[in-house]
Amino acid sequence: METKVVHTHTGKIYFNPLMGLEFLTVGDYGKENNIKADFLGLTKKIDGVQHHDVNIQDKWVATISTQKGCPMKCTFCDVHKYGFFGNASMLDLEYQIRYIIEHEDVRFTNRFNVHYARMGEPTWNPSVLEFTEHRLDALVRECGLHAVTIHPVISTMMPANNERLAEFLQKWCEIKNVLRHGEAGLQLSINSTSDEQRSAQFAGKSLNLEEIAAIANALPTPVGRKYTLNFAVTEQTVLDATKLDQLFDKQKFIVKITPIHQTTAASENGYNITTTYDNYSVYDQFEKPLLDLGWDVIVFVPSKEEDSDRITCGNALISYAPKPFSESAERE
Ligand code: SF4
């Protein structure tokens, strides 16, 4: 079965049901258009993002799957509807990056971001570490792409029953801080400072906040960009800035605020996702108390086109394709 392509306003989504992989390639509108971050001098409130053409020579984002489906059950995410069929292998990771690069004409970019964030929870897959440490940069060169900066990023929802989670994150930080001299990202999905609300969002499969803070505070001081605490919000989100400030170190972490995206699961599970794209006041209520406490905060707003294209986190076109795997191949 061939890899299928869906064209979007800013790039392409690829999926291959036989391989159990979905991945995407997109450009970016530019941070002055879709980000408010006072500490970076980007102080304009983002009351909606206008779509315009993007140029992947400026910034190219490759988002790939680390697992075939996902064993988690986050209630805002469509990925687990596909089921779970194991980890992506080294060859699967390589396939996705190679496919993305070889299906564009562009052979130069200022920045090639690799997000391990389409399907799966990356900390379950040790190949993510091996691939980033030993294969990614050489592979990009082999594919003929000259990227001034290659910036891999993992986002984790901090799974509760992963005994090797802390070890994985320590290794990732070594890759970021030592091997890549800061040129990598680490994002922890927090989403709420209420353990009750978190439990509902992550279906009881994420550590509680104090457990996350213990692991986070044991991480080394970041080189380059600080680590990120992600908050995907709706108006109902609980973000207690004082509590967050007590639990996490603002010298090591920034907070990133985005809307919860308009996935099928988010609609089915009653998330209020209707107001969050063109009214900055939704974000203001979360951003201001953190700024007052001295935190660095990024507010990232997608365009309506990006969300309707389903390139945003929590979407998976493959969930609606026929499954080539037998039911017995499905894992717990
Ligand atoms: S948000 Fe991430 S960890 Fe949660 S179900 Fe979706 S892909 Fe899995």
Image (spheres, rainbow, N blue to C red):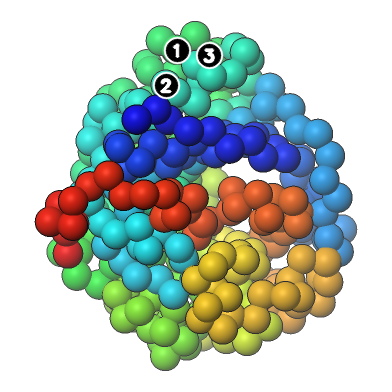
Percent position (x, y) of residue 237?
Answer: 59, 83
Three-letter code for the amino acid on which mark 3 is drawn: Leu
Q: Decide: marks 3, 1 in contact (CB < 8 A)?
A: yes
Q: Nearest the camera: 119 or 237?
A: 119
| Residue 331, picture quadrant | bottom left
Q: Which mark is residue 98?
A: 2
Q: Residues within 10 Å of mark 1 (few under 14, many from 20)?
A: some
Front residue (pair 172, 7): 7
- What is the C-alpha distance between the residues marked 2 and 1? 6 Å
Q: Residues within 10 Å of mark 2 (few under 14, many from 20)?
A: some
Q: Residues within 10 Å of mark 3 (few under 14, many from 20)?
A: some
Q: Label 1 amino acid?
A: Cys
Is residue 161 visible in this depiction of the protein? Answer: yes
225 sits to left or right of 162 = right
Q: Nearer the viewer, residue 244 or 58?
A: 58
Determine which residue is flagged by label 3: 145
Q: What is the x, y in percent for residue 47?
A: 86, 64
Residue 254, above or below 323: below
The answer to which of marks 2 and 1 sits earlier in the sequence is 2
Label 1 sits on residue: 143
Labels 2 & 1 near each other (Cβ < 8 A): yes
Label 3 – label 1 distance at C-alpha: 6 Å
